[in-house]
Image (cartoon, rainbow, N blue to C red):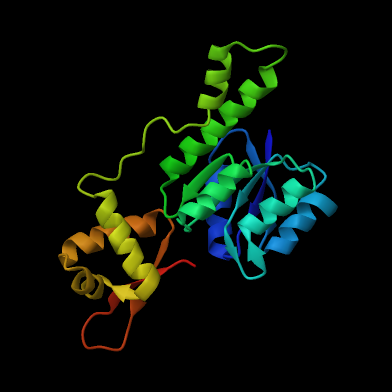
Amino acid sequence: MINVLLVDDEALTLELHRSFLGRLDGFRVVGECTGARAAVTAILEHPPAEGIDLILLDMTMPDGTGLDVLRYLRAHASDVDVIAVTAVRDAEVVRQMASLGVAQYLVKPFTFGVFRERLEQYRGFRRKARKSAGQATQSEIDAFLGAMRPTTSVPLPKGLSADSLERVSGAVRDEGPLSASEAAGRLGMSRVAVRRYLEHLTEVGRVERTARYGGPGRPESEYRWRR
């Protein structure tokens, strides 16, 4: 069993990741933290009795960054595995996280399929690591390192594109809450198409849909990014 610590300052994100892990074999959540200091304390000072094998680590928190947490852990000789789970796409942050030994860098928003693929890759990596002993051949080393490389991307629902998904995600994240009509107007896309992307984001847990009241007629749905 792989013991996982969840670190994110968004309660809804913690709930989402907890539910995703609950659908996978071989993983269990042993702790949750909403800040950088709490994460360091849970890992180095007061770890859960079960121990921690893996951290799902957010990059942006009120009292520090995921990069700060990982630097501190490595400076104190902690070799706990880390998967960054974040909306931060800055290339320099990615480079620094890689240099500190992050196992995966998973960019929000993502589907359960993508999450499952990356966690199953990690599980395979650990399995190969436990079986390794003595001198390894080049092919064995390649297989060991290759266990953490994504194999195939999980396709979006038919008719949706990754580029348009990113545009709609950015509009809601930066300018929301928005209705489908408002987002369509900002993006120059059809309302029907934008609504499909918004509903997809709702299904994967990145967007929250609520009813907007106040105008004549039926209430309109608005979509808010889950911070």
The quarter of the picture where residue 218 lies is bottom left
Q: Decide: is 187 above or below 4.
A: below
**Residue 98: % across, % down:** 56, 43
Which of the pair 218/1 is nearer the observer? Answer: 1
Which of 77/51 is in front? Answer: 77
The answer to whether residue 151 shows anywhere in this view is yes
Front-lying residue, 178 or 18: 178
In this rendering, position of residue 107 left or right of residue 53: left
**152 sits to left or right of 227:** left
Q: Quadrant of residue 150?
A: top left
Q: Is residue 81 left or right of residue 199?
A: right
Q: Is residue 209 visible?
A: no
Rendered residue at 53%/47% (across/down)? 95
Task: Point out the image quarter for the N terminus.
Answer: top right
Numbered label tally: 0
Q: Report which quarter residue 66 is drawn in.
A: bottom right
Up-down: is 97 above or below 181?
A: above
- Residue at the spot 48% in from the left edge and 58% down from the top edge: 88
Left or right: 211 in relation to 56: left
Residue at point 73%, 39% (across, down):
79
Q: Position of residue 62 (x, y in %)?
A: 63, 70
17 or 184, nearer to the observer = 184
Q: Position of residue 203 (x, y in %)?
A: 38, 55
Q: Position of residue 165 (x, y in %)?
A: 29, 56
Q: Is 19 located above or below residue 3 in the figure?
A: below
Residue beneath the point at 23% across and 50% down: 160
